[in-house]
Structures are given as structure tokens and as C-alpha cells.
Image (tube, helix red, strand yellow):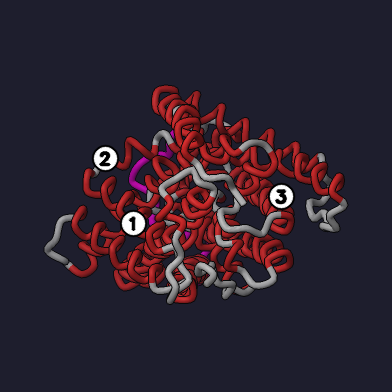
Amino acid sequence: MAAPALDRKLGLADVTLIVMGGIIGSGIFVNPSVVAARAGNGAGALGAWALGGAIALAGAYIYAELGSRRPEAGGQYAYLREAFHPGLAFAYAWALLLLIQTGGMAASAMTFARYLRELAHVPLAEGVLSALVLAALTLVNALGVRAGAGTQNVLMVLKIAAILAIVAAGFALGSHSAAPPATAAPPATGFGSAMVPVLFAYGGWQTAAFVGGEVKDPSRTLPRGMVLGVVGVVILYLAVNIACLRVLGAAGLAATPAPAAALMRAAFGETGGRVLALGVAASTLGFLSQSMLTAPRVYYAMAADGLFFGGIARVNARTHVPVRAVVLQGVAATVIALTGEYGRILDTVVSADWIFFGLSAACVFALRRHDAAAGAPTTATVPFHPWTTLAFIAASAWIVFQSLAHDPRNGAIGVALMLAAWPVYLLWRRFAAPRP
């Protein structure tokens, strides 16, 4: 009797919303102020968001081609394994579990718990609430990919509604009609520094590729969903920034630490503030749901290669979900959330994350050569390759440099943790069963 396998149940709408859910977190409700302050003027701020969107779209096209060439569970893990070396793929999965995905999930769980305490006056500590919400999402995603995707889709619709409410508030108010800020804006630091929080805010489109083994007609659905999702996010992000600039002006936006809240309160009073708080809570919960749906597939793929505990690759016969991989992700995020030290860990994330973005883009060159030699009939989808691909790799390298220059100690910790994966990989390989 054949072992249970992953079930292909996700369609184009699911992939599109998964892409958008992986990008949009709570940052868009705050980051416009940071970007405007660093850019120094409205044109520079909008230009940074537009350029960031173009870079994200280039990344989406790159991952769209990779997804069509290797529509497997694990996404980025599979691309690195096939293009370069299993050890590099292992290092990515290692960093994802110990650093990138788990740290981000812990931070989002704590943010959600903070808003829930304020909105519902729940008499529980933030760490306990974080653990409870992570446990609930672990259970939902263990019930099946359809249940996990359905939950993620509902939360994504709530996110979009919250963002559209901010845009509506911006156009309901007159130009520069919000109350002037009580504090002066921080000094501008230039367009380059403004791009850093923009590119951070656009990260996350790649996680849809993790569920490539559960997508219907993945060679067509993954590329279309990735591009549509990123285009949707770019439109929403630009609309929010235009609304903020219209009401607050460049100087007012730069000096307002919570611009979305300022717009909603100015347009709709305290009710608007509460609606925004609900929107932020839904946004952080949606990121958690998306992460719990996608990231465990990387650990599943690694275990299927014999480079992790074998039970993590076991698929439940009833739900067709790698339940143990889902539980592993939930437990790891819960441990960090309960310690309350996630902020220190998040400081180490950026350098490792963008190193792997650049390496994954380089996979396009390697896999094109490999498939051409094998006579594979895969269609190339990256427009203006190799120039756009090389530009994305350069942008990734620039982000890594900026993050290391901004916080060399924690950035170096992230890189060191990533390099520590190599001896662990060599140890696992000694005991690994050959990959079919």
C-alpha cells in the first residue's frame, strides 16, 4: 500500500492570497512614516515604494519561473538543492526554522497578543496569549491544507479591508487636514536608507512556493499567483502612501509614528482607531496563519531527503498534511514567543534572508542550463533576463550590506548561525537514506 502523499487542492485564488498574506504584515500601518522621514520628501517616499514594488515584482517573476521548473514541496529549498548543492538547501531550511520564519512568527504572535489584550481586555500575559494563538493555528493547519488555506484567505480579506479603509479615510479627509504632529520629523538620511524598510515590507512572496506540492496545475498556477499577488500588494502599498501624503503631507507623515491610526481617527473618530486596531490584529494573525501553512513544507522536504528526523516527512493518511512538520513549526515559534526575546533574534534575520533571496535568483541560471541540457520543455518567464535577474541579485546583496552595516553584531550572528548549518549537514548526511 502506497504511503499517503500531499494533496493538490490549492487553486489560483489560494496562491494569490498566500502570496499577499506572506508580504503584508503589520508594517504597512507604520512603515510609511519611517520611509518618508528617511526620504525627506513625498516624491522620494513614493519613489522608494514604487522602486521596491518593481524589485519585488522582479523577484516574483524569478520565483514564478523557478516554481514552474520545480513545482515541488519546499519551494526555495528544492531550487537550491537542484541548482547547487543539498548542503546549501539544508542551510536554508536550518535558517528558516531557527531564525527567519520562526523569529518572525514569534514577533507577530506577540504583536497580535498585545492588540488582543487592548481590544478585548483579556486577563492573560502576552506570552500565554501568543502560545494559545500559535496552538490554535497549528491545530487548524493540521486538519488539512484546505482548512489552513481557507483560514488564511479569510484573514487576508480582512487585511485588504483594513487597508482599503485607510485609503478611504485618506480620500474622505481634505488635503493636509489631519492635526499637525506634536514632534518634529527626524532628519532625512537619503533615498538609499529609505529603501531598506521598503524592501523589508515587500519581502515574503517566496513562501507560496513552499506549498508547490499541493497546488493544482503548479507549472501554470504558481507563476500566475505569484505575479498577481505581488501586483496586488504594490497597488495597496502605493494607495496607502498616497492617502497618507494627501492628508498629512510629507513632513507630517515623517513626524507621525502611527500614520494609519492618525488617518482613521481623524476620519472616523475613536471608532476608526478601534477598527484599525482590529485590522492590525487581523494582519498579524494572517501572517501567522500563512507562515503555519507554508513553512512546514520546507521541513517536510528536508526530512524526505533524509536530512532531518524521518517522522517530519510523514503525511497523515486522513488529512494529507505533514502534521509533525506543522507541530514542529508551532512549537518552535511558541518557545521563542514565551521567552519574550524574539526582538533580539529578529535583528539577525535580515542578512540571512536576503542572502538566500540572491542565491535563489541565481538558481534561474543553473536550472535553465540543466533543463536545456536535459531537453526539458519549460517556458522561461523572467522578462528581460539576465538583466532583471542580475539586478535582483545586486539588490539582495545591497540589502545584506545595509543590514550588516546597520547592526554588524546581530547581522554577523545571523550569518554565523547560517554557516553553522554546514557541519550539521555533514553529520546528517552520514546517516541519510539515499534520496529516490
Q: What residue type is labelled 1?
A: Gly
Q: Can residue 263 be seen in this view?
A: no
Magenta part of the protein: which range?
171-186
- Is 190 situated above or below 251? above
Question: Which label's residue is closer to the chain start, 2 or 3?
Answer: 3
Report the disc number at residue 341.
2
Q: Nearer the viewer, residue 95 or 393?
A: 95
Q: Who is closer to the viewer here, 433 or 71?
A: 433
- For residue 195, side relative to residue 414 (left or right): right
Residue holding disc 1: 330
Instruction: Pick the residue in front: 335 or 159.
Output: 335
Q: Is residue 22 above or below residue 187?
A: below
Alpha carbon distance from label 2 to label 3: 34 Å
Residue 62's disc number = 3
Q: Was residue 176 drawn as part of the magenta stretch in this picture?
A: yes
Do the numbered discs 2 and 1 sit on residues whose CB atoms are within 8 Å?
no
Instruction: Give the SS element for disc 3.
Output: helix
Name the residue rendered at 33%, 56% in the picture.
Answer: 330
Q: Which residue shows up at 24% across the image and 44% down it?
A: 340
Disc 2 from disc 1: Cα separation: 17 Å
Q: Where is residue 383 in the image (x, y as percent from the top left)?
A: 82, 51
In the orientation shown, which residue stands out farthest toward the front?
1
Counting residues from the start of the chain, the first of labels 1 and 3 encountered is 3
- What's under tag 2, amino acid-wise? Glu
Q: How far apart are marks 1 and 3 (CA)?
A: 29 Å
Q: Evaluate if marks 2 and 3 touch, with contact meaning CB atoms under 8 Å apart.
A: no
